[in-house]
Image: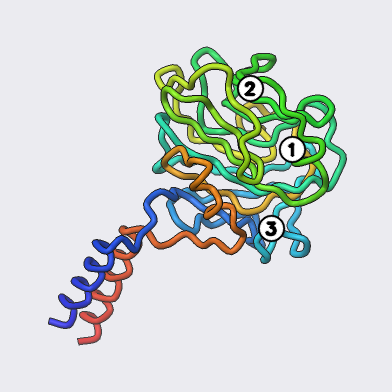
Amino acid sequence: MKQVLLLTAVCVLCSQGVSSADVISCWNLNDAGDATADLVGSNPGTMYGARVTTDTWEGAGAFQAVGSKDYFGTQSANGFSVSQGTYIFSYKKDGTVSDWKDLLGTNLKKANTSYPLRLEHTSAGKLRLYVQSGTSVSGDYNASSTLFDGSWHTVTLTYADGDKIKVYIDGSLVLESTANYVASEYTLKTYFAVGNVYPWLGEAKSAAGRYDRVLVLDNAATAAELPTYLDPSYVPEPTIMGLLLLGSIGFLRKRSNR
């Protein structure tokens, strides 16, 4: 009877909206080793680069791209969608970023291209969205006095079928694709990375700097919704499946102790 009550209580919590189903994955990039735990979903990642424990975004640690091939990435995309989504990461430029360096490589790959949809540092501190080498899908945004000023910032990329691809810095819209995103023109790949698109092509193009908390959402977040996710103290709530798993573990432990 006690076991049934335990599982019932967990289900009641789920029905009351305790979970946050919009967050697919969250990595704080403060793990001591290369392996990086997904705090919400089932997409473990790996860091290739240095670790720092001071001057970080969320407090416990950060990943530092000091070499040309440094990046954080995951090779799985459980819960990701080609139809809509949001990528969020924190970044601080703490080195010299020369032209044409990668900041973000998404899971989205357009037909007949080798690269993923990605965000690059171009010339003179500018940002641009690309789907292939030399093929831009946006104009330029001069980020030399914002994203590349040597302070911590958050970068957000959102996409939704039939809408513009949008890039935000600290919650403010700074860049849009020139045409609407068409989901049927893209495929969803397993690789996703910040700092480089090295997993795809083996290119040495990391944008030097520190990278901290990375979030992936299952919808295209609006400007009004972003402040919650951009707060360094934000902690994603357990998913429904996570709560049910905890309840099941409690049930089994109770039963084994009878």
Q: What residue sits right under mark 1 in the picture?
A: 69
Q: Confirm whether residue 214 shows in the render.
A: yes
Q: Quadrant of residue 4?
A: bottom left
Separation of marks 1 and 3 at Cα, in angstroms: 22 Å
Q: Earlier in the sequence, mark 3 or mark 2?
A: 3
Coloring scheme used:
rainbow
Instruction: Estimate the x, y position of residue 124 in percent, counting from the top left.
Output: 84, 28
- Mark closer to the observer (1, 3): 3
Residue 130 circle label:
2
For the C terminus, the quadrant is bottom left
C-alpha distance separating marks 3 and 2: 27 Å
What's the residue type where badge 1 is placed?
A: Lys
Q: Say which of 209 and 182 sits in front.
A: 182
Question: Gap in Å between the C-alphas at discs 2 and 1?
Answer: 19 Å
Looking at the image, the residue that sits furthest to the bottom is 258
Residue 57, label in figure: 3
Q: Quadrant of the N terminus?
A: bottom left
Judged from this view, the residue extending furthest toward the front is 224
